[in-house]
Image: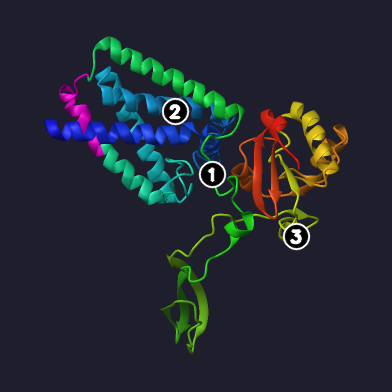
Amino acid sequence: MKYLVGFSRVFVGVLFIISGFIKLNDPVGFSFKLEEYFSQGVLDLPFFEPHALTISIFVVIFEVLVGVMLLIGFRTKFTVWSLLLMIVGFTFLTFYSAYFNKVTDCGCFGDAIKLTPWESFTKDIVLLILIVILFLERRYITPAFSTRTNRLIVFFAVVLSGFYVYHVLNHLPVIDFRPYEIDKNIKDGMSVPEGAPEAIFEYAWKFNINGSEKVIVTNGDYPQVDGEFVDVETKEIQEGYEPPVHDFTIEQNGEDFAASLLLEPKLVMVIAYDLRKTNTSAYAEVKRVTDAASKKGYRVIGMSASNKEQTQKLVKDYSLGFEFYFTDETTLKTIVRSNPGILVLEKGTIKQKVHYNDFDELKFE
């Protein structure tokens, strides 16, 4: 049991630190995931949505902290109780997501590692078993260092986590795990490689044949049956390849201009996924840098999921020298964790990407 507790202690502690750090690197992205859980049709807790970012920051710092505390054996009773309560909550959420197919990605490891809902639930069941062992046999969890040293380690873990969160919130994630990182080409990200697996569907065709129902299963072909068609049920039995960049459009008046705009040798994208939540104080700087880009021969466009009336009002209020196109809100949130943020592209390749606090770092050649 002593060795089992030792293994569980290291495994759980390291996993919590890794999981927490990945989300610590992108607390805004984790807050978007929490908003999904809080939304109507999932947990129906919309009153938590405005506080999603605050909850996100607290959870990720606490996740790192309990991982560190478990490894060094500090405040064992508090640590194992915290771990148990957290994993019970996580297991409930992943089971709910998997069983009811509500949230297709739990966000356990942010954008770094994508898990299906059932994979996430399985992972949490394993962790739950290990944490129950730690909870029941916590007498074997001994301090790694002196009390004073352990306190200093925990103190520095909190301080470093706090500074790291402050930095990524006011700039961008230090490590970009998304398909829109600098030097990635958006067109390439949308392409499907030759020989990639295709989705396979199973169709259960229901017919009325001589007064009785008969179900015929095929992989797509309409069965040759002498009877009256009643219904068909479709089930995906094998997932096909999904390119890392999908649902990417740049629309205006119902027409998608993505293909032509991604061929532009000099393109600046001003991205504001929701103008109701955007930082309006940044638009004086947006005007300055976009006017400078236009003089250098860059084409400048805005991209938002807000309606035409909102975008036109923003353009008028700040005398912006460009017009907005419509893009899916989730896609825009994925592209840049800043509202607004700016990207500079060269024939579809992202050359620069900045938070509104870093507009002065943009360089136009």
Q: Quadrant of the N terminus?
A: top left
Which residues lie in the magenta part? Answer: 129-143
Rate crowding at label 1 as few (under 14), some (14 to 19) or many (20 or more) other CA atoms within 10 Å.
few
Q: Taking 161 as reference, is 98 above or below it?
A: below
- Outermost residue on the front side: it is 365
Tell me the SS state at disc 3: helix
Quick one: 328 or 14, which is closer to the camera?
14
State the residue at coordinates (37%, 31%): 17
User: Which of the two labelled residues, at mark 3 and mark 2, occupies the earlier sequence position?
Assistant: 2
State the residue at coordinates (27%, 42%): 126
State the residue at coordinates (55%, 65%): 192
Q: Residue 214: which quarter of the image?
A: bottom left
Q: Quadrant of the C terminus?
A: top right
State the residue at coordinates (70%, 51%): 346
Residue 123's disc number? none
- Outermost residue on the top side: it is 148
Tell me the SS state at disc 2: helix
User: Which of the two labelled residues, at mark 1 and mark 3, occupies the earlier sequence position?
Assistant: 1
Q: How far apart are the alpha carbons under marks 3 and 2?
A: 42 Å
Q: Mark 2 — residue? A: 59
The x and y percentages for residue 250 are 72, 53
- Outermost residue on the left side: it is 1
Residue 41's disc number? 1
The x and y percentages for residue 332 are 65, 45
Amino acid type at circle 1 is: Gly
Q: Mark 3 — residue? A: 260
Question: Does any portion of residue 88 appear in the rendered image?
Answer: no
